[in-house]
Image (cartoon, grey):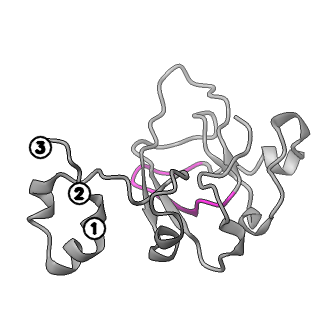
Amino acid sequence: QSLHLDVGGPVHSLVKAPAIGVNFVLEDLTCADAPLRVVPFSHRDTSDPPDLMSESKVMKHSVLCPLPAGSAIVRDLRLWHGGTPSGSSSTRYLPNAEFVSLTWGSLTCGSGEILDPCQPVLPAAMYGTLSAFGQEISRRLISAELD
């Protein structure tokens, strides 16, 4: 998989991460199990990531492995990253959660950009169970869909 970012828009003008992702390692991850590769400090690079054929060997070998089950990979979503081929016949699961900063949220709310934090995804019944602060910061996320 070619290197890419997981967030779009005017991300490089921000000093702090506009969003972070946390990948969860469910099983021991060897270097043959399609580990994630991440290019250090690339979140500061304002150019586009190179395509797979143009990548340096250093970029192709920037793999995060081995990692024991229970590990978490926390990364700024501006970091260039990509997948690697699997040398295993089993499926490798690496679920993730993504968190958007309030600054990024205010810049992208309703824009349709990747990780637009104002997509209405929160069921009204769940919203009613939140604390006052939780309701304040998520009031624009209430889904019109039936619970």
Q: Where is residue 90 in the image (x, y as percent from the top left)?
A: 48, 23
Q: Name the residue under label 3.
A: 147
Badge 3 amino acid = Asp
Q: Is residue 19 left or right of residue 15?
A: left
Give the mark nearest the N terminus, 2 or 3: 2
Disc number placed over residue 138 in the picture, else none: 1
Q: Main secondary structure of the magenta part?
A: loop
The reply to whether discs 1 and 2 touch (Cβ–Cβ < 8 Å) is: yes
The residue drawn where x is 42% and y is 42% is: 27
User: Residue 33's x, y, as percent?
Assistant: 57, 34
- Residue at the (62%, 45%) spot, across then down: 36
Give the amino acid type for the residue marked by disc 1 in the picture. Ser
Region rendered in magenta: 66-79
In terms of secondary structure, where does tag 2 sit?
Answer: loop
Pick whichever, 105 or 41, lies toward us.
Answer: 105
* Residue name at image x 59 percent, y 51 percent: 6
Q: Distance between the residues labelled 1 and 2?
A: 7 Å
